[in-house]
Amino acid sequence: MAALLIVIIYITFVSLGLPDSLLGSAWPVMRGEMAVPSSYAGFVSMLIAGGTIVASLSSDRLTKRLGAGPAVCLGIAALAAAMFGFSVSSSFWMLCAFALPYGLGAGTVDAALNNYVSLHYAARHMNWLHSCWGLGASISPSIMGFYLTRELGWHSGYRAVAVIQLVLAGALFFTLPMWKKPGGEDGGRSSSPPLKLAEILRIRGVRFVLPAFFSYCAIEMTAILWVPTYLVDVRGVDSAAAAAYAAFFVVGVTAGRFVSGFIAGTLGDYAMIRIGCGVTLLGITAVFLPFESNTVCLYGLIVIGLGCAPIYPAIIHSTPANFGADKSKAIIGVQMASAYTGSTFMPPLFGFLSGWLGLRLLPYFLLLFAVLMMTMIECLRRSVFHRGAPRA
């Protein structure tokens, strides 16, 4: 039964990644039909992120009341409803309305699953879990492309993903008994009161892990959004080649997490984070190097993706060991909120700064957050070790 449950969890994370690339794939057609500027996609994305942040901050309360299994099931059902809502939307305001349950559902699933796996499964599963998210995010543009190329419309693409989410919600409902662990607990259901945000922030080490998570997501999402433009405008790379290398960055993250799963249990979470930070810094340095040829820069971007790969899963998986299993639900929720804040606001901030200082700022921007992330990770490690938690 345990093997079946982890398979269901993997499938759930693939499903969680499916909606994330749909908007970008369909937006060129959607904005034309709705007669809105291209920039309006940012409003929809911000609403989704806002819902995700709210859900992450509320995850401790929800999981303690319902349990991990029902919370995940409810979150997937909310995602299914949001995808159906997108599929019937005929105006921009309808997209905005359905963006909120999209964000709430995604945030609920993300926080509940990350906590459940960090408590009950080895580090390799956390890496493979996030690799599955990348698989889902990579598949969804193909799903949308299938319907667009056959002139079936973007509505059909969203409807197809909604059906997948609905079927998964039904499957999750029938697996709810599997989520219960010895002692009758559902990986999170508890009668103890949920921690308040002020209480969480006073826990030793939390003030270090939040900026570390924020910095990681700032690096990842800024690179995904701005690398193609940087390559074309600053390095003179052909636009098709720039798009390919930007895609390789995401592939590097996904493949790196798959490979990390095989060694994470041997090396431990902190070693994986340190290796990831070092490789990320190496990749950013390669982008800096002023070679006339772009080869080093292009491969440096792939190296950044490989370096990013183990950091996010390892920080999540180390949370129960760092802060205690009784506090992990609350802290992982706040970590998720910090991560989404970084991924939501830092890419637009770079866009604003680049308009003022130029796109050559990109490597310096990434380097700033890489150094901040490494510094916060070392401060967290020393803080946790001083308190007596395991160093591995």
Image: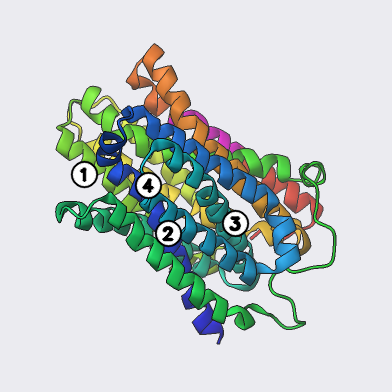
Q: Earlier in the sequence, mark 2 or mark 1?
A: 2
Tell me, yes or no, if residue 119 can be seen here: yes
The residue shown at (27%, 58%) is 143
User: Overall secondary structure of the magenta stretch?
Assistant: helix
At label 3, counting other C-alpha atoms closer than 10 Å, the crowd grade (few under 14, some 14-19, many 20 or more) is many
Can you identify the residue that label 1 sits on? Answer: 244
Q: Which residues are magenta?
A: 366-375
Q: What's the distance in space between the residues labelled 3 and 2, CA to CA?
A: 15 Å
Q: Earlier in the sequence, mark 1 or mark 4?
A: 1
Q: Could you tell me the amino acid type at mark 3?
A: Thr
Q: Look at mark 2 in the image and give the residue it sits on.
A: 133
Q: Nearer the viewer, residue 291 or 343?
A: 343
Q: Secondary structure at mark 3?
A: helix
Q: Nearer the viewer, mark 3 or mark 4?
A: 3
Which residue is the site of mark 3? 108
**Amino acid type at image mark 4:** Gly
Task: Indicate the quadrant where residue 142 lies.
Answer: bottom left
Residue shown at the point (34%, 55%) measured from the top left: 158
Task: Looking at the image, tell me whether mark 3 or mark 2 is earlier in sequence order.
Answer: 3
